[in-house]
Image (cartoon, rainbow, N blue to C red):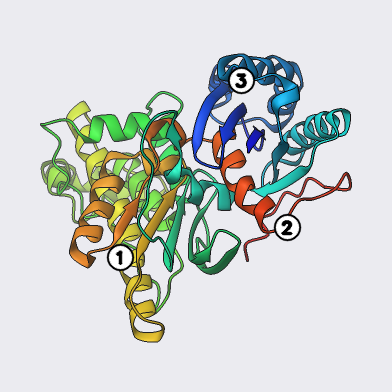
Amino acid sequence: MIILGIESSCDETAASVVRDGVEVLSNVISSQTELHVEYGGVVPEIASRAHVERMLPVVREALAEAGVGLGMIDAIAVGNRPGLIGCLLVGVAASKALAWSLGKPLIGVDHIAAHLYSGLLREAGVKGETQSLFPAIGLVVSGGHTSLYEVTSWVNFRRLGGTIDDAVGEAYDKAAKILELPYPGGPMLDRIAQRPDADERAYDLPISRLNPGSLDFSFSGLKTAVLYAVRGVPGARGGVGGAKAGSERKQGAEKNNLHGLAEAIAGEVVRPTFGEQDKINLAASFQRAASAAIALKVRRALDQHDVRKGPISSLLVGGGVSANSRVRKELGAIAVERNINLILPSLAHCMDNGAMIAGLAYHLYAAGKATGMDLQAVPSTGMV
């Protein structure tokens, strides 16, 4: 079965042709990074208009790259939730038009579930995953989502926990902005955190645990700790406590005690001196804390499932932050430690893409989950 998948939930216009749910014949992604870089984030109206302009060229390119004509397509799939509503509407409208004109089934796909599926995608001619995957714990880590799921089949997901504030990708981007790294900030922070001279223990940043049994995430405190490390603590006379690299800066501030006291009384912030090496060390310390928080909750989810329902077969991971070097390393260690399958997407399939939409749609269609022309764009996920 050959499915054309369309994805437009945020700032990538994507289309892909996938055979039998796993074999990627084409995967075309038009990124809008250059349109949003001056704003330091995605502007929804700009993103929506760009989707309108790029949708047809991207679909045509995907078909041409796959060597497939429209008459060979068996179904049209589209990510119809969650996402920016204006962006979703463009993809849904285009998919409805194609499905109606071709007389083919239309399949609406939840973007979050598709990310969990993305690790099964493979290029044409490459052998795919054959081991038993279920039951599984699913982890979605992206700019808009950080969630854990129990997955018992490709049509059965149960949410276990999610972020109560910032998603991990959002925290990465905000931390990168504080560190004055170029947009998109998350990949840039990962890059400098990997430098040989980076000291990931230079700053003692918080790792959120919430209550002992919680499978929810919180990254706002970590982001704030980065802000204080760079700009100082409001009303304090030095940098952030617990930062080894900041000890000399704090000692220097103490020598000028009267000046520091005067600024504190005035309600001003004493900003520590913050050099290039401090930036590198803080990036590495942030990455250590963020990945440790993710690993902590994954282990909790595995432990709880073991106690209540028995052992897990696989850990399914998806989303843009699944491309992060430290996150991949931490999850790999968990898989070895627990003797479970780790299903990570290739780097090409970590970002939003049409292949994951088409791949999961194959299983939805087989389960009788095809939708009609009344399919709606919905800004929230249905996986609750």
Badge 2 local density, few (<14 within 10 Å), some, or many (20+)? few
User: Which residue lies under the disc numbered 3?
Assistant: 62
For the N terminus, which image quadrant? top right
Tell me what residue is drawn at x 10 percent, y 42 percent.
Answer: 248
Tell me what residue is drawn at x 33 percent, y 40 percent.
Answer: 324
Tell me what residue is drawn at x 52 percent, y 58 percent.
Answer: 165
Give the left or right position of residue 325, taking residue 132 as reference. left
Q: Amino acid at mark 2?
A: Gly
Q: Is residue 239 in view from this perspective?
A: no
Callout 3 touching callout 2 (CB < 8 Å): no
* Mark 3 and mark 2: Cα distance apart in space: 26 Å
User: Which residue lies under the disc numbered 1?
Assistant: 296
Tell me what residue is drawn at x 23 percent, y 41 percent.
Answer: 284
Tell me which label, 1 or 2, sits earlier in the chain. 1
* Mark 1 and mark 3: Cα distance apart in space: 39 Å
Percent across and percent down for residue 66 are 57, 20
For the C terminus, which image quadrant? bottom right
User: Which residue lies under the disc numbered 2?
Assistant: 368
